[in-house]
Image (tube, helix red, strand yellow):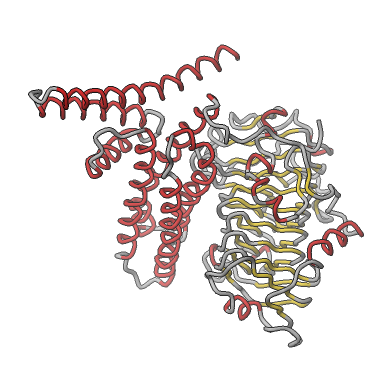
Amino acid sequence: MKSAKLTILAATVAFLLLLGVIVVCAIQYKSGESEDKKKDNEEASEIRLHAQSKQVKEMCSVTEYDHVCVVSLSNILKQTNLSNPQTKDLMRGAVIVVSDEISKVWMKSKLIKSDDPNVKGAVQDCEGLFRHAKKELLSSIQAMNIQGIEELPKKSPEIKNWLSAVLSYQQTCVDGFPDGTIKNKMQNIVKLSKELTCNALAIIDKVSSILEDLNLSDVVNSPTQRTTTGRVLPEWLDGDDRRFLMGRHTKKMKPNITVAQDGSGNFTTIVDAIAAIPYEHEGRICVYIKRGIYTESPILMAPNVTFYGDGSRKTIITGSKNFVDGVRTFHTATFAVDGDGFMAIGIGFRNTAGAVKLQAVALRVQSDRAIFLNCHMDGYQDTLYAQTHRQFYRGCVISGTIDFIFGDASAVFQNSVLRIRKPLENQQNIVTAHGRMDNHESTGFVIQNCKFVAVKGVEIDPKKISYLGRPWRECSRTIIMESDIGDFVNPDGYLPWDGSFGLKTLFYGEYNNSGAGAKLNQRVRWPGFKVITKEEAERFTAGEFIQGRDWIQQSGVPARFGLYHD
């Protein structure tokens, strides 16, 4: 093992050294040209281009779509007229070509014409998704305006977070079209832009990991510290501890806006309250939603907003949009939040469509650095759509049947209850369906110190039709650690999506779980499933996996940033 690690390290060092040597050679030749003006300019240009070509090929060697990478980076070098590009220039160029291609894809999607309202709606969805993609690509490009390559490890979590979302947006666009010719056409339209996105992720992931291994920067993430902010409590219990935690966070808040159905607040509906929130504002806006059942489907776009209620069983947002009635899954959400920095405390989110209506989302979260504390998410199929970015769920209860936690987010669930409901007669229960498409994406679901429970009828079902997860996409990633798994879970643990799809490329890990359903001797024998070590588990803690110390700790929300047990 030690020998293998040294071999890998040697190869990665050579990767960077070769890039550095090529740059130095190019610079040295240019200096020689100024000393000897009689040298042939054409020969100098040829040598310089040859050096650039080697740089590009070496950089692209770490990507899956290396030919696409070489062509795109070579073109961007010609356009920018960089005679002596540095490694950081090539990395930045890899993101610029994605942005350029997304613009082309956006324009092509607008040319799709159809009388089918579902197609028209999908085109509109794509426009919004590509707008998000362009914004996050711009953020990525700006973040790469660094002085030296040693600054990359500090920037890479943010950049990989944004690029992972960009990849997800493209596939979400395609998924919105009904099956058929137009959907296949859209799939072909985004093919190149997806490949370029995967290449950019691979390049940034590789270079940043090399720098971290070589310890070239003092801004590399520090080792996991097993600390807590606030008390660690069994928050799945509806007792004094839960009420204490809830009061502790809400009693200090002074609402900017109050929503009350009895007219005692600023607004009687959440939709009207959201309409009053400016997209650009200073600080955090707090919205207090008094007890009541709010039957509406709000969408929050503004950043840095906190919603808090009188308790997840007292303040409830409910709806019943669903796929069977002709609504695309993306739009079935009872509540959707796109604005970054969102926080919800003591609120219930429901979709009451029922199992017969198939996909019916209660909560869709696109927000980066989103926090949900002491909330309920209730539904059946597709209850929680953890769509993109970094998310943290603490002390929540999430209930459903099929894929009831799904999406391509980097989400950590802590001290929460995952409650399996009774499905239709011909159905099976699956808790998670993660949608990671590329193994360089920074996304995944982490379930830590949680409890898997089931309603009566499922809990004692001898058929054991309940599973922990299945791969929605090829590189699906789910880690379950330090959690209690009931006996109702099938000993296999996981269910295939379709034949052998994703079984070699997914990553499913378990660590230090308890309960009758946590026995590992009968787990699936897929190449992608493994029992992970303590060292591997620490990589998936809230402190490391979603950089929680940078934002969860500041919120004052109780959180464990390391492992709970030795």
- Is the C terminus in the top left, top right, bottom left or bottom right quadrant? top right
Image coordinates of residue 76 in percent, x first then y, are: 27, 42
The residue at the point 61 percent across, 78 percent down is 271
Residue most extreme to the right:
240
Image coordinates of residue 484 in percent, x first then y, are: 81, 42
Q: Nearer the viewer, residue 345 or 354?
A: 345
Give the left or right position of residue 158, taking residue 295 as reference.
left
Q: Is residue 102 above or below residue 117?
A: above
Image coordinates of residue 124 in percent, x first then y, are: 42, 68
Residue most extreme to the top:
3
The residue at the point 64 percent across, 36 percent down is 508
Give the left or right position of residue 378, taking residue 105 as reference.
right
Rendering quarter of residue 225: top right
Residue most extreme to the bottom:
263
Q: Nearer the viewer, residue 462 or 189?
A: 189
Image coordinates of residue 96 in percent, x first then y, are: 35, 47
- Is the N terminus in the top left, top right, bottom left or bottom right quadrant? top right
Q: Is residue 170 above or below residue 483?
A: below
Give the left or right position of residue 346, taking residue 471 as reference.
right
